[in-house]
Image (cartoon, rainbow, N blue to C red):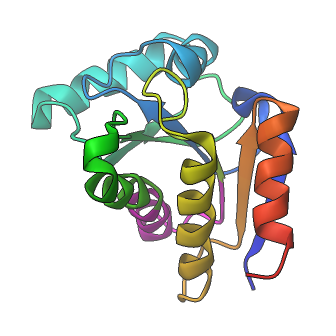
Amino acid sequence: MVRVGVLQGDITEVEVDVIVNAANSSLLGGGGVDGAIHRAAGPALLDECRQVVARQGGCKPGDAVITGAGKLPARHVIHTVGPVWRPERADELDQVLGSCYRTSLELAAGHGLESIAFPSISTGAYGYPRDRAADIATSTVRAFCNEESSVDRIVFVCFDSEDTERYEQLLYSDP
């Protein structure tokens, strides 16, 4: 049985097998969660990301790649690129955002990892509506929990109390 939880705090301090980075397509660091993860991990993470870029040319929205975690307490970082919110493309972008979570979970399972922590993907600079993003994140995770996998612990790490309450309500109320 997969345990799913919510934690308010700093994703760079969470002790899990893998944390998910809300990356940009260059994979070379940026602002928000991406910048915080790169700063906390140190230069080894950037070096690994450069190697990924040299092999495949970055990462497109909805996809994910895995690297080591440098100085972070996690063993790995999964970098996924969320969509930039455009209301006129809402249905298409919802699919891309769902793919960020699903692909990250599949990548973690494919590497035999047991615990994963997610930030709220695309809700910062990319402008995704927080309620909509949280609904997509939790519904995607619920669907994954019904599959056979090595992943047995999933944590949503929220930066503020408003997001924490939003995720708790979605996860702990009847679907």
Q: Quadrant of the N terminus?
A: bottom right
Q: Is residue 28 magenta?
A: no
Q: Which residues are magenta?
A: 102-116
Q: How many labels, in total?
A: 0
Q: Quadrant of residue 46?
A: top left
**Residue 67, position in %: x, y?**
41, 38
Majority secondary structure in the magenta region? helix
Residue 83 shows in this picture: yes
* 131 to 144, vertically: above or below: above
- Residue 22 is left or right of residue 134, and the answer is left
* 27 to 148, vertically: above or below: above
Residue at image position (52%, 40%) is: 121
* 140 to 136, vertically: above or below: below
Residue at image position (64%, 16%) is: 40
Q: Quadrant of residue 143?
A: bottom right
**Residue 167, position in %: x, y?**
76, 54
